[in-house]
Image (spheres, rainbow, N blue to C red):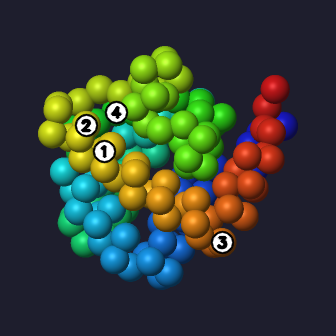
Amino acid sequence: MTRQVSLAETLGRALDAMRDRAPSMYRALSAQLHIAATRLSVDDETVPLRSDGASIALDDGRAPFSVHVRSDRGTLLDVAAGRVDLVSAVLGDRLFVSGDVASLVALERAAALFVSWATCSPAAWPLFHRYRDDEGER
């Protein structure tokens, strides 16, 4: 059985909901991701995140990235739920990041903004629950 719910779909829908329901937070997130073009690899899926400073795109991934993040589904959901912060996940070897210092600082700020929205937004949790509950291949 293959996964039915992709990271790209979940993240895309979450970003759309954030843009529609919390535009000021979305703009702040866009500004941070403009500094930290990110390649997010979770299990066997890679999602490129890039911003022009005003909007966020899940792009084709061909342009260079300033940050690469690698982790697993459980850790990503723990970070999104605020159960573990980004720095603790890195220090606990649950999440691996590489990039220049300015980009990593921007990524940490972007993650904090996203988690702040996600933990309070009724729009976010149905998306994350669906992603969490999709067991996929075992």
Query: x and y percent of residue 46 in the render?
Result: 48, 39
Total label count? 4
Residue type at tag 4: His
- Residue at (72%, 64%) from the top-left corner? 126
Secondary structure at numbered mark 2: helix
Nearer the viewer's eye, disc 4 or disc 3?
3
Gap in Å between the C-alphas at discs 4 and 3? 29 Å
Q: Which residue is mark 3?
A: 122
Mark toward the start of the polypeptide (2 vs 3): 2
**Disc 4 vs disc 1: Cβ atoms closer than 8 Å?**
no
**Disc 2 vs disc 1: Cβ atoms closer than 8 Å?**
yes
Residue type at tag 2: Leu
Q: Which residue is mark 4?
A: 68
Gap in Å between the C-alphas at discs 4 and 1? 10 Å
Q: Is residue 44 visible?
A: no
Q: Is residue 78 above or below residue 109?
A: above
Gap in Å between the C-alphas at discs 2 and 3? 29 Å
Mark toward the start of the polypeptide (4 vs 1): 4
Query: x and y percent of residue 83 in the render?
Result: 60, 41
Q: Which residue is mark 1?
A: 107
Mark toward the start of the polypeptide (4 vs 3): 4
- Residue at (48%, 72%) from the top-left corner? 18
Residue type at tag 1: Leu
**Disc 2 vs disc 3: Cβ atoms closer than 8 Å?**
no
Mark toward the start of the polypeptide (3 vs 1): 1
Query: x and y percent of residue 3 in the render?
Result: 74, 43
Secondary structure at numbered mark 3: loop
